[in-house]
């Protein structure tokens, strides 16, 4: 131990100078974060190496001490990586576990590492570095997911399916177009991830406890060494800010919501009643009692993950909402929320990417459903506007009567005879039958962003150039 006095042994060796005894067992339990913040070991060591290097460069510690500190920290890094490092709850958190071990290895020089810093800026640094790396990982995973959708969209640019509003058949669309809707959603998620990275790209180290430090430190040097754009500009804000964690959780919550909508569609599409897709064996499970079943468990679990990710966001917002500036120990509760959300978002994105790539698209079922439910009624109304010059409202009414007639005869709009249609409006000609098919309907929607296969292919090319 760095300081072998009796008092320091019974109280905390890092801050126990003024304490006559150690903490109550419950105090130790509620106070310790090592159980979860040991995840930050690599960031903590990187931060300490950058800090010690800067301290030596500025003549605040000797270069011999700096060398000892760095050698010791590297030893600790490999011990943790090999699993031989003994974490101690008495030492509260990752910062003090590492510093105490450094003292064991190199002796008194270890005590110089904490010059001009505090655990408050240290934890802000470690956690920011961790979140930054996680965001970079998320960005990459979203790109893989988008790539899966682009491939399916390309393959199914001409595959017709019913488009829904209110989950009622609305108008025919293509499966490619539907896939591209998700590309837009995950593309926005990825843009939010990039924005969050840009936002957090400021180095907290050197803010010290809250007020800065009298030592002649160089925060630009540490910021650069740690890969940050620049140092933060207000030391009070620096140690009391967890916006970077909240932004990660907000981005994660919105992305999880998107994944959940997709999961819900997969659950619906894979029912025998819909039968639009068949999930691969790799992403479904069977029932122990009903041999015929194939359950979309992966999709259901992705849908459920949204609950805990939203929960993490609300939990941290609630932790932060009443805190006076600057640091309060409440903020220690930030990490588990972010770690849990990160782990589960990664799982959800990976599962979705696999499911999308693997599932069989049942084009026959989609085509059949696309034509049902009078899905081309709008095409009839549009034809009446274009060819008969009816005002749209009137065309809507005429079409409604045609739908009612078809319904009473249990047939499709395209199965009504010309004579029957002319009874509703004598100006109708047999040219109308050209627009009543689902393929014609889809092909006609060439407006920018519309469902026409040619337009969908243009949007796929636009995204390919950006993925
Ligand atoms: N374990 C603490 C946390 O996660 C580190 C910072 C402690 N700072 C302090 N002044 N007690 O927030």
Image (tube, rainbow, N blue to C red):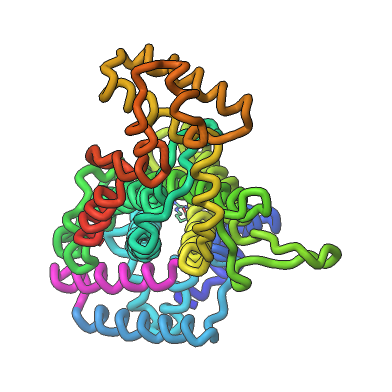
- Front residue of this view, candidates 124 and 443: 443
Please give the name of the residue rendered at 34% of the width and 54% of the height, measured from the top-left corner: 121
- Report if residue 312 is visible in the image: no
Q: Position of residue 445 (x, y in %)?
A: 30, 39
Q: Quadrant of the C terminus?
A: bottom left
Please give the name of the residue rendered at 38% of the width and 54% of the height, measured from the top-left corner: 176
Q: Position of residue 395 (x, y in %)?
A: 37, 17
In the rendered view, tell whether residue 6 sits above or below residue 185.
below
Asked where in the image residue 135 lies, by quadrant, the reply is: bottom left
Query: Is 75 situated left or right of 7 in this image?
Result: left
Query: Is 104 situated left or right of 445 in this image?
Result: right
In the rendered view, tell whether residue 249 sits above or below residue 406.
below
Q: Position of residue 293 (x, y in %)?
A: 75, 62
Magenta region, residue range: 37-62
In the rendered view, tell whether residue 273 sits above or below residue 141.
above
**Is residue 305 a member of the stretch shown in magenta?**
no
| Residue at far right of view | 289
- Front residue of this view, candidates 406 and 267: 406
Asked where in the image residue 83 lies, by quadrant, the reply is: bottom right
**Is residue 38 a member of the stretch shown in magenta?**
yes
Q: Position of residue 327 (x, y in %)?
A: 41, 44
- Front residue of this view, candidates 372 and 293: 372
Please give the name of the residue rendered at 55% of the width and 63% of the height, measured from the top-left corner: 36
Query: Is 244 situated left or right of 466 in this image?
Result: right
Q: Main secondary structure of the magenta part?
A: helix
């Amino acid at each position: 131990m760095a300081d072998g006095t009796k008092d320091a042994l019974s109280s905390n060796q890092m801050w126990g100078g003024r304490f006559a005894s150690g903490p109550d067992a419950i105090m130790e339990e509620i106070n310790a974060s090592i159980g979860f913040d040991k995840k930050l070991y690599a960031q903590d060591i990187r931060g300490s190496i950058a800090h010690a290097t800067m301290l030596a460069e500025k003549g605040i510690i000797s270069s011999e001490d700096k060398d000892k500190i760095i050698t010791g920290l590297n030893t600790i890094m490999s011990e943790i990586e090999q699993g031989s490092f003994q974490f101690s709850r008495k030492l509260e958190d990752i910062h003090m576990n590492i510093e105490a071990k450094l003292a064991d290895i190199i002796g008194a020089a270890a005590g110089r590492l904490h010059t001009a810093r505090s655990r408050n800026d240290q934890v802000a640094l470690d956690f920011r570095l961790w979140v930054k790396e996680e965001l970079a990982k998320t960005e990459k995973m979203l790109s893989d997911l988008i790539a899966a959708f682009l491939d399916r969209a390309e393959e199914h640019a001409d595959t017709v399916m019913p488009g829904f509003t209110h989950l009622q058949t609305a108008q025919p669309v293509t499966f490619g177009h539907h896939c591209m809707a998700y590309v837009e959603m995950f593309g926005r998620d990825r843009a939010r991830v990039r924005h969050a990275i840009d936002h957090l790209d400021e180095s907290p180290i050197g803010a010290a406890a809250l007020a800065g430090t009298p030592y002649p430190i160089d925060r630009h040097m540490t910021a650069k060494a740690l890969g940050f754009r620049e140092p933060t500009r207000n030391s009070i804000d620096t140690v009391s800010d967890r916006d970077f964690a909240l932004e990660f959780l907000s981005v994660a919550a919105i992305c999880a919501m998107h994944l959940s909508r997709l999961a819900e569609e997969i659950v619906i599409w894979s029912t025998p009643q819909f039968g639009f897709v068949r999930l691969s064996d790799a992403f479904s499970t069977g029932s122990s009692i009903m041999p015929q079943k194939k359950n979309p468990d992966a999709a259901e679990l992705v849908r459920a993950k949204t609950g805990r990710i939203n929960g993490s966001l609300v939990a941290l917002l609630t932790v932060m909402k009443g805190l006076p500036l600057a640091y309060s120990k409440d903020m220690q509760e930030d990490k588990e929320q972010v770690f849990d959300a990160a782990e589960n978002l990664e799982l959800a994105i990976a599962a979705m990417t696999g499911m999308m790539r693997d599932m069989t698209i049942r084009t026959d079922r989609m085509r059949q459903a696309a034509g049902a439910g009078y899905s081309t009624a709008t095409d009839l109304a549009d034809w009446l506007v274009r060819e008969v010059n009816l005002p749209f409202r009137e065309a809507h009414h005429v079409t409604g009567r045609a739908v009612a007639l078809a319904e009473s005869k249990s047939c499709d709009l395209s199965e009504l005879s010309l004579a029957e249609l002319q009874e509703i409006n004598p100006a109708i000609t047999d040219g109308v039958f050209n627009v009543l098919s689902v393929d014609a309907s889809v092909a006609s929607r060439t407006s920018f962003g519309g469902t026409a296969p040619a337009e969908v292919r243009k949007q796929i090319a636009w995204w390919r150039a950006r993925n």
